[in-house]
Each structure stands twice: as structure tokens, then as C-alpha cells.
Amino acid sequence: MNSTEKLNRYSINSIFIIVVVSTLVLFFFSSPRHSLFQSGAFDLGFFDQGIYLISQGIYPKSSIIDLHMIGDHAAFILYPLSIFYRIYPDIHWIFLSQSVAISIGIIPILKLSQQKGLSIKNSYLVVLLYLFSPIIFNANSTYDFHPDIFAVPCLLWAILWAKENKLFPFCLTIFILLSCKTVFSLTVIA
């Protein structure tokens, strides 16, 4: 049995465990920071207020910068996030959603590593390098919340779908990526 067969056999359980554990760890580091009054009021307050207003069907104009939510960066991704605020309006949804988004990025990393012929150990090493990357950790916990964080897994998935020649998932992922922030159109073009 070669390394790719072993990866396929054990991948579902191990990927699920890694995604859940990394989500919990990332959420653990971002959520208490807010509870200890160490989160920034400007960006976090702007997005929290906007998502809440969207969830209530109210015109989402920020009282912080007197601007419509979409007028800031055209982050249409905030509209699907408002569904969670409809269930229960709590800022921890934002922290949880970005922790899940970062963690889901390991799936295309593992698949791309497998396609490149890396061993199982090296594939998981690449995943750990991604999860322990300072930029990923800081984006999750230090900079509170930005819709840009959803672009990271979207870009990874887009690369995977492009390599697998799957046009519809590729286009859908690019659409989601572009809904994170208008500036990502330059990244998509590149």
C-alpha cells in the first residue's frame, strides 16, 4: 500500500479531527481576547454592527464611520454571515466563522500535497506550517476580524479546483473570494 492509499484511507477522520481541533484552538485565542477587553473597537465594531443591522433587515450604515457596510470594501460575504446573527446576535459568531474558515484551508493543502507526491508525514507537516504560520494566527486573533480572512481558504480551494480542472467549483470559489473584498479582483486576475 503506497502513501497516497494510506492518506485516502485515513484522511477523512484525520482531516476532520485537525479541522475541529484547529478551529477550537483558533477560536480559543480570539474569543477570550475580546472578553478581556483587548479587542479593537474600530474594525470589530464596524463589522459587528453592520452584520447585526443586515441580520435585522435594517439599512447597514455604520455609526462609526458614517458609511454603508458595502461602501467600505464591498464585502458581500457579510450578508451570509448575518444568517448566524439572525439565530442569535453575538460577536462570537464572527470569531467562530473566521476560525472555521482558516481551518478549512487545510483540506486543499492536503489534497495539493498529495497531488505533488508528498508523503503523509510531509503533507501533515505542510498543514502544520500553515496552521502555525504567524500571519494566519495573527489574522485570526490579533487583528480581530476582517472579511479578508475568508479569502485565504478560497484561494487555496481555487488553486485545487483549477489543478483538478473542475470549472464550476473553481468559478464558485472565485465568486466567494471576490465577495470578501473588491481588491481581490487583482489577485484573481493574477
Image: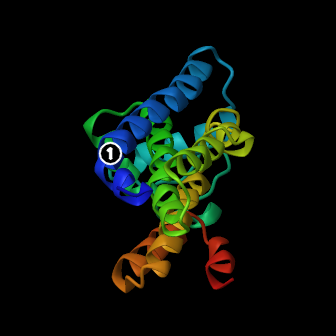
**Does residue 69 appear in this view?**
no
69, above or below 183, in the image? above
Residue occupying the point 44% across, 75% down: 161
**Residue type for callout 1:** Tyr
In the rendering, at what x and y percent does residue 106 appear?
49, 50
- Asked if 11 appears above or below 19 in the picture, the reply is below
Q: Which residue is mark 1?
A: 10
- Binning the other alpha carbons within 10 Å of mark 1 as few (below 14), some (14 to 19) or many (20 upward) gives few
Q: Quadrant of the C terminus?
A: bottom right
Q: Position of residue 115 (x, y in %)?
A: 49, 69
Q: Residue at x 32, y 45 (%)?
A: 10
Q: Is residue 52 above or below residue 183?
A: above
Residue drawn at (59%, 23%) of the image: 34
Residue 104 spot, x, y in % from top left: 44, 50
Image location (x, y in percent) of residue 79: 40, 57
Relative to 58, 50 lies left or right: right
Which residue is painted at 59% across and 52% down in the image?
Answer: 149
39 and 21: which is toward the camera: 21
